[in-house]
Image (tube, helix red, strand yellow):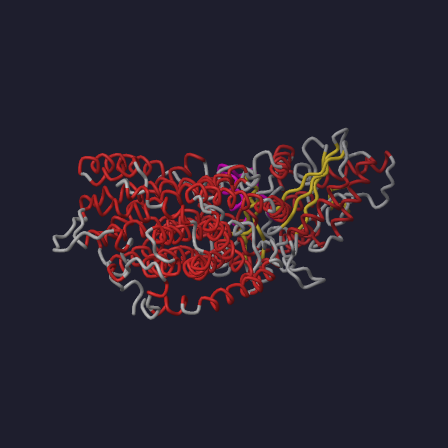
Amino acid sequence: MSFGSEQMDEMPVVKDLRDFDTSTGNWLERLVFNHRVWMVAICGLLTLVLGYQASKIKLAASFEKMIPHGHPFIKNYLENRGELPGLGNAVRIVVENTGGDILDTKYLEVLRQISDEVVVTPGVDRAWVKSLWTPAVRWNTVTEEGFAGGPVMPPDYDGSPKSLAQLQTNIANANIIGSLVALNNKSSMLVVPLLEVDSATGQRLDYHAFSRLLEEQIRSKETSQYKVHIVGFAKLVGDLIDGLMKVAVFFGIAVIIAAAIIFLYTRCVRSTVVVIVCSTVAVVWQLGLLQSLGFDLDPYSILVPFLVFAIGVSHGMQRMNGIMQDVGRGTHRVVAARYTIRRLFLAGLTAVLADVVGFAVLMTIDIPVIKDLALSASLGVAILIFTNLLLLPVVLSYIGVSLSAAQRSLQGEAAGGGGMGKLTIMLTRFCERRWAWGALGVTAVLTAAGFLVSTHLQIGDLDPGAPELRANSRYNMDNAFINTNYGLSSDMFAVIVKTPAMGGIEYQTIVDTDRLGWELQQVPGVQTTSSITDSVRGFTCGSCEASPKWFTLARNPKTTNIAMTYSLQLNPDLSNMEFSVMPVIAYLRDHKAATLESVVSAADKFSREYSTPDRKFLLAAGNAGIEAATNIVVKQANRTMMLYVYLAIVCLCFVTFRSWRAVVVAILPLAITSILCEALMVILGIGVKVATLPVIALGAGIGVDYALYLLSVQLQHQRAGVPLKEAYTKALEFTGKVVGLVGVTLAAGVITWSFSPIKFQADMGILLTFMFIWNMVGALILIPALSSFIMKTPAVAREPISNSEADQPKVAAM
């Protein structure tokens, strides 16, 4: 027997359990309720086992999980990563002397201690660390006897005035003012490239642990005079994880709010506790399974457990409400729970599958962190089939609900108010054409305005610094300090010049590389560029008694070879030893979406025009290059993802309703909310990126629950010959009031996120609150308004369905 195939008159009020035939119902109902003890025992055992596993799950992050491995930019970077030290994952540490400048003995001692600590820190690519104390930072100059050079820090440095004077001269000759030394000479920088895998342990770099080491070993040396500023992906992730540790507080607040609202609605402690506990069990199972499968929680999926809890509360309240109404009419609690399986399981299953598909679609996005989020969310929501669609009714069949609360749930129905009094009377007016016209007119105006605003939605970051954190966070203040005091920002976009071995010394390669640097300098947002051609020009000039007319690129390959070999000793970041991989680095003013787009456009145009089989200009490396590739993937995935989400929802709704008209009525409110959500993102200055991309898909997947529960009831009554207004009233009586309650409950829970110190969590809280409210409002107002035009009640010779006979029609009967 299929789910929900029983007719409503087969579900009479059964007061004595002995009068109920346990062989009736579909196979799932019999399997679950004829073995209730086993159901509870198995779920209890699973909760204990998975709860233990969940206790071991940890927060972690990976640089490589944040990048789209399939994008050509990233493929180019990964293929040449070994030849491009410092252009991937790196941390920058600035030590500031607030009471003087860097030519101070005590300051230099503090800097030396920090430099030594950094070099031996696990996870650091120590061979490429740069600071005033590392031998890799060198100076050079032209003398009467030829070239002279050496480490910036004098080998015989002893803190004497003579040593300090020599250091000052070396800094000037090394041309590092504005890069490793501040423009005002009051601070200096350490550039610390990181290894994704610790060579000593073979384990992936733990960014949270690394961030703590930076705080404990480096920042701890900070005093009132010597300040330490740290930026970089590893530090950002560490700060995010520290902030997200507080997410448990928001989760607890959300649970309290949900419990309070449910209790105020039901006045029944038992049913409130069951809904909260079953939803929490789903979260425990999810975390336990993720740990068992070898997954960690990252900063972008930490919010998924709350979404699972919220969806669980939504479905749990519908089942609790159905059982409560049956018990209020006198039905035994076990029979009432079985009736709930018959009536609501298919609707709930369809809604859960819609959520699962909505999350699973995110796996089409070629960014590992989003794929992990999609897997985590899909798994968590699928678990709700067992914990909230099946276990919850079974538990309520044992402990029951408060009789007074059950009777109270029918008071509105008995008074003819649809369970919500004046609100129901107002909502049912939208079944009338004149009210429907008004609702649809206002909706059309809002949608049109929202669409116009949404056309300005941008991809990527819209603010300087790290938009994931508040503007007044320590990280963003450190980033602002560095951008203010150094001539070159930490946002680097690198084009990789790749040739056969020794192909870099060819004159045409050198000329085109130099031309690329000049082209990029003309792009708005580019501060300057750096490539090996700059050093080659200086060497050629110095070889000719520093005559300015020789500040050029020599055609003689021998001269070029000597110049590039010498330049490589001074700055090994600018080429590999075979002169076959040479980056052209553009230092950007910021990493805003518009800046990255303009740089990518110019570099791509140059690459297509000047690349040959033996000389290729490959985009892109550097943190800005990687972010540009991520933005491109996010932009391509944004519309495709939403298309797949809505296509899946349409298919599931059609299978459920078996009516294209009903599908249109269910989908339109969701689409309108998605448009308005994008407009809100524009107004709030939120771009579409890794952190925000899933929000609209999640909102659409969760929002369809409202339509499924409300429209399925209305449609069943209409097909039985009940007029639209009466059918909609009956839908409000059974599921509509819970739809409104769920919308308010979820919104009240997530709005607390807006107080989070993590800005992207606050942004998600605002967006989800908006979507929860508008999806709820859209379901309650637009479903009757749209139904009045495209879903007319058929003329059938059948008595109207009475809720007192069977409460709730079956979805499968539609």
Residue segment shown in magenta: 512-532
- Indicate whether 469 appears above or below 803: above
The answer to which of 513 and 24 lies nearer the viewer is 24
Relative image position of residue 564 (x, y in whole percent): 65, 52
Name the residue: 72% across, 54% down: 126
529 is within the stretch colored magenta: yes
The tally of labels here is: 0
Relative image position of residue 265 (x, y in whole percent): 41, 42
Quarter location, residue 178? top right
The answer to which of 44 and 125 lies nearer the viewer is 44
Q: Is residue 71 visible?
A: no
Q: Which image quadrant: the N terminus? A: bottom left
198 is within the stretch colored magenta: no
Left or right, 683 with reference to 296 = left
Q: Which image quadrant: the C terminus? A: bottom left
Relative image position of residue 539 (x, y in whole percent): 67, 46
- Indicate whether 108 appears above or below 663: above
Quarter location, residue 95? top right
